[in-house]
Amino acid sequence: GEDCNYLGRLLEDGDIIIYSDSCNEELKCYNGTVEITHDFCTYMKCEAETYMLPGDCCPRCRGHDKKSCNVDGELFQTGEEWKPNSCFSCFCNNGRVSCRKTQRRCNDEWFSMNISKRKISTNPCVESN
């Protein structure tokens, strides 16, 4: 097959390159065409168009869909589950966020301030006496 040229970089047919930057982009060269995938994006069906903010890797849904959950300005769709940290798992259900502890020794107060994906503490599971 044909080689690919991506931003001045030559990829041979069949090459796969993973850029481990904030986006975890995976580039695949297939017969002259480069396919790019962002490996951790949860592709969601948006009622409205999607948009990206500077620094984003994954598209967001535009507009406050009634069924989506808004957490600190970040929209999650109904049925979407995310882990803000190693202590909790959260779920969006028709506009309501419900979260559950995945470990017992987690600080509730810390959790209530940090349920968006963007704010990940290095050690959220600080034991509280």
Image (cartoon, rainbow, N blue to C red):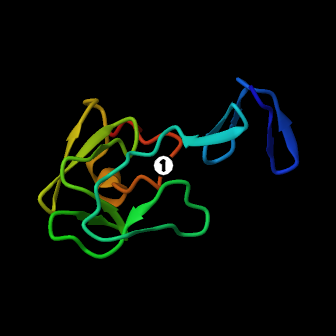
Foreground: 107 or 59? 59
Q: How many marks?
A: 1
Residue on which the image places disc 1: 120
- SS category of the residue bearing label 1: loop
**Residue drawn at 82 percent across, 51 percent down:** 7
Instruction: Say if residue 129 shows up in the picture.
Output: no
Residue that appears at 53% across and 69% down? 53
Residue at the bottom extreme of this rendering: 63
Q: In the figure, is residue 100 to the left or right of 32? A: left
Q: Is residue 52 above or below residue 34?
A: below
Place of residue 57 in the rendered image (x, y in percent of width and height, measured from the top left): 55, 54
Indicate the quadrant containing the C terminus: top left, top right, bottom left or bottom right: top left
Q: Quadrant of the N terminus?
A: top right
Residue 75: where, in percent of width, then height? 32, 63
Q: Is residue 13 above or below residue 120?
A: above
Q: Position of residue 40 (x, y in %)?
A: 48, 40
User: For the residue carrying disc 1, how many other residues have a C-alpha within 10 Å: few (<14), some (14-19), or many (20+)?
Assistant: some
Looking at this view, is 87 or 116 the one in front?
116
Q: Is residue 35 left or right of residue 72?
A: right
Expressed as whole percent of the image width and height from the top left, the position of residue 67 reads 15, 63
Say which amino acid is labelled 1.
Answer: Ile
- Whether residue 40 is situated above or below residue 31 in the rendered picture: below
- Left or right: 44, with 6 as reference point: left
Q: Is residue 48 above or below residue 56?
A: below
Place residue 37 in its image quadrant: top right
Q: Nearer the viewer, residue 29 or 105?
A: 29
